[in-house]
Image (cartoon, helix red, strand yellow):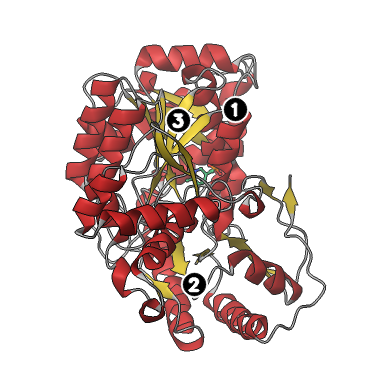
């Protein structure tokens, strides 16, 4: 079923459309068409949704119907709208705007490159002692075959304990250990989504989650996030779930990647209730939940509002500890965990015992390690914000109060061009379209603050220099960013 945006909803998204820059020179219909194009380009208005009937939008905007008719005509002519008589008009992008939006980033071994394509910290100093202690523990496991499809009991207990501490009572048989959060997502999708199934995701969202969905040939509906807090629009998100009734929704409510937004408790509760009412399973990615900054108090876990096993939570060690560990997990009902474990034997059998033991030691030390990570991230974020304010003051950023990334709104649809130019001066960037579908989000750039402050400041200086060159038309031999297509 096609989703539809109502007149009042579109009017709210359009905001002050009649006061856009350059407005004085263009008639009302052209300004309206331009504002709709802007929403599409930013991913706030999804592709393939039915726009309100002309009369309905005219009423919502308190303008004449002829203005809306002319605006829709212009949008059809520019390739942003497809109409069928009697059936309505659907949003689209002109064919030339489409670019590949998924694909894995391959950090190259280029020592001089400042890599802002990857949003993850280097290992903490506690990692090596934890690895040594894990090696000491290993003999306890060597008498067995070493296959533990749901994970070793010590780690499942530690992870369950951490959920319980957060106010979400959890037993070890509700936990399955995986090889990272990405693996957890892939396994959950194998279990919960038939090929071609319908999924709702945020726009922007985490590129490798989009890649996992593409691998399932998922049909995707998007919910566009605003730059400003809280990011999610309750009316549109819940309306989208009710209309599209997707099989599954993939959300990152805790310091969303890339925007850094934190979903308020009341919306979590309503999303879970609505998902249950329409038969949607929620996959909640908690990759960044351990990293609130500025004393931010976390809302209750999304799964704490779940009474019907609708919410599957995934998380892992990569963001608070180290990505190289490749340890993540799924929290679900015990029967779901059993089904996941059964599915897993056809994939990778089990996670390495030694790495799980390292994770056990790190989790035992979690309060101290994570406190140091937060202090480090706060200092690095502040250095990045200060450098941006100084060197690129036209860019708009909402200060993230957690996670490891900020989502900058640029001064034009230049994100991919900027990423290509930055690569030439030794800065790898993940441009906006990587985080969306169909080539939207060109006015945005994700900037992680996981590198040392000096590198971030240097990177911003180089980005500002190439930004200036873009305006002056100075183009070097641009290469594609490093991706596996
Ligand atoms: C939202 C989100 N989910 C999953 C992952 C993958 O995490 P892992 O290294 O645990 O597989 C990341 C890593 O950046 C992420 O940002």
Q: Residue at x 62, y 45 (%)?
A: 102
Can you identify the residue that label 2 sits on? 410
Instruction: Point out the image quarter for the N terminus.
Output: top left
Find numbered disc 1 in the image and state the secondary structure of the residue it sits on.
loop
Q: Earlier in the sequence, mark 3 or mark 1?
A: 3
Can you identify the residue that label 1 sits on? 217
| Number of other residues with Cα within 10 Å of mark 1, as a class: few under 14, some 14 to 19, many 20 or more | some
Between 209 and 381, the one lying in front of the other is 209
Instruction: Point out the image quarter for the C terminus.
Output: top right
| Number of other residues with Cα within 10 Å of mark 2, as a class: few under 14, some 14 to 19, many 20 or more | some
Residue 446: give x, y in percent of width and height. 51, 62
Residue 169, can we see it?
Answer: no
Image vertical order of residue 268 relative to residue 483, above or below: above
What distance separates the C-alpha of mark 3 from that of mark 1? 10 Å
Find numbered disc 3 in the image and state the secondary structure of the residue it sits on.
strand
Q: Residue at x 36, y 43 (%)?
A: 51
Residue labelled 2 has its Cβ within 8 Å of some atom of ligand 1: no
Between 171 and 458, the one lying in front of the other is 458
């Amino acid at each position: 079923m096609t989703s539809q945006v109502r007149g009042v909803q579109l009017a709210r998204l359009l905001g002050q459309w009649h006061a856009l820059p350059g407005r004085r020179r263009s008639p009302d219909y052209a300004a309206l068409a331009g504002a709709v194009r802007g929403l599409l380009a930013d991913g706030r208005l999804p592709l393939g949704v039915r726009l309100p009937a002309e009369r309905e939008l005219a009423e919502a905007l308190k303008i004449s119907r002829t203005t809306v008719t002319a605006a829709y005509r212009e949008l059809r002519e520019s390739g942003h709208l497809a109409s069928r008589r009697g059936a309505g008009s659907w949003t689209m992008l002109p064919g030339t705007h489409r670019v590949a939006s998924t694909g894995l980033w391959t950090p190259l071994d280029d020592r001089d490159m400042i890599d802002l394509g990857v949003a993850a910290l280097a290992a903490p100093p506690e990692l090596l002692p934890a690895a040594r202690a894990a090696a000491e523990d290993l003999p306890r496991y060597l008498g067995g075959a070493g296959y533990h499809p749901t994970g070793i009991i010590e780690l499942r207990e530690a992870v369950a304990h951490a959920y319980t501490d957060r106010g979400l009572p959890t037993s070890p048989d509700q936990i399955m250990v995986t090889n990272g959060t990405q693996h957890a997502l892939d396994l959950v999708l194998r279990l919960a989504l038939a090929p071609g199934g319908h999924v709702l995701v945020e726009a922007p969202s985490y590129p490798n989650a989009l890649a996992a969905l593409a691998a399932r040939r998922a049909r995707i509906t998007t919910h566009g996030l605003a730059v400003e807090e809280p990011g999610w629009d309750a009316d549109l998100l819940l309306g989208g779930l009710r209309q599209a009734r997707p099989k599954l929704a993939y959300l990152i409510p805790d310091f969303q990647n890339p925007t850094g937004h934190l979903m308020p408790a009341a919306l979590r509760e309503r999303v879970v209730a609505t998902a249950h009412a329409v038969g949607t399973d929620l996959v909640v990615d908690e990759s960044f939940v351990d990293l609130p900054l500025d004393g931010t108090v976390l809302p209750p876990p999304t799964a704490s509002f779940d009474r019907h096993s609708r919410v599957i939570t995934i998380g892992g060690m990569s963001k608070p500890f180290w990505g190289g560990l490749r340890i993540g997990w799924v929290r679900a009902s015990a029967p779901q965990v059993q089904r996941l474990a059964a599915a897993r034997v056809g994939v990778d059998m089990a996670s390495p015992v030694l790495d799980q033991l390292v994770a056990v030691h790190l989790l035992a030390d979690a309060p101290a390690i994570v406190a140091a990570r937060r202090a480090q991230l706060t200092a690095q974020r502040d250095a990045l914000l200060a450098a941006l304010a100084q060197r690129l003051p036209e860019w708009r950023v909402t200060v993230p109060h957690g996670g490891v990334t900020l989502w900058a709104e640029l001064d034009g649809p230049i994100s991919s061009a900027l990423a290509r130019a930055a690569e030439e001066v030794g800065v790898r960037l993940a441009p906006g379209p990587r985080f969306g579908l169909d080539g939207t989000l060109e006015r945005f750039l994700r900037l992680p603050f996981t590198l040392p402050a000096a590198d971030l400041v240097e990177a911003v200086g180089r980005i500002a220099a190439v930004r200036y060159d873009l305006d002056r038309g100075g183009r070097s031999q641009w290469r594609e960013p490093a991706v596996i297509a």
